[in-house]
Amino acid sequence: MDEHNSRNSEAGYIKSASAAPSMRRLEEHLVEQGAKQQCGKFEVRCHAGNSGHLEVASDSVSVRIGQRIRKEGKEELWSSLLVECKEQDDGSLAVEVVVFHPDWEEPVRIASLQSRPCDVSPAKAGLRCDLEHKQV
């Protein structure tokens, strides 16, 4: 998604009535397997401090995180991390983590996680993890 489309798709903050959602223990966030399958292929839980939080399930996800930097004497918001989640042509589910740096010519994929939730073979690992860094 390009910068223009990213800005157009912003819908604002989604707030929860619960206090301090990021202070809850991770175990409290677990969702039963049946609920996950009915709601989507991926689950997102985003806690943005005092601005609120978002918890959704979807068939695809793209999250871009920016942070303030100083570049050439000027402060700017730099998109430094991208997480993309989508179903591949073979039916597997992939999560790609990409890092951006102002001094690099190309972004670097630092992680790729793949699962095959429909594969019932007990001999295969449920989640495959590739941590080899690759330019994208």
Image (spheres, rainbow, N blue to C red):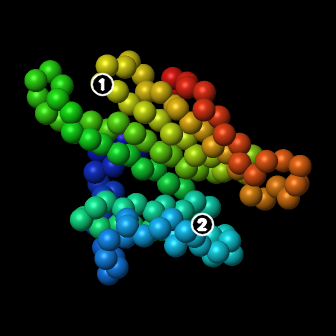
SS at badge 2 = loop
Which residue is tagged 2?
40
Q: Is residue 116 left or right of residue 17?
A: right
Taking the spot 30% from the left edge, 24% from the top edge, the residue there is 102
* Kind of residue sitting beneath label 1: Pro
Q: Is residue 12 above or below residue 124?
A: below
User: Which residue extends farthest left?
Assistant: 73
Can the viewer see residue 5 in this picture?
no
In front: label 1 or label 2: 1
Q: Is residue 124 above or below residue 106?
A: below
Taking the spot 52% from the left edge, 31% from the top edge, the residue there is 109
Taking the spot 33% from the left edge, 49% from the top edge, the residue there is 6
* Kind of residue sitting beneath label 2: Gly
Chain-order first, disc 1 or disc 2: 2
Query: Considering the image in quadrants, where does the N terminus appear?
Result: top left
Mark 1, residues whose alpha carbon is within 10 Å: few (<14), some, or many (≥20)? few
Q: Which mark is residue 102?
A: 1
Q: Which mark is residue 58?
A: none
- What whole-number distance in Å separates the C-alpha atoms at marks 1 and 2? 35 Å
Q: Give residue 40's position: percent from left, percent from top.
A: 60, 66
Q: Is residue 7 left or right of residue 21?
A: left
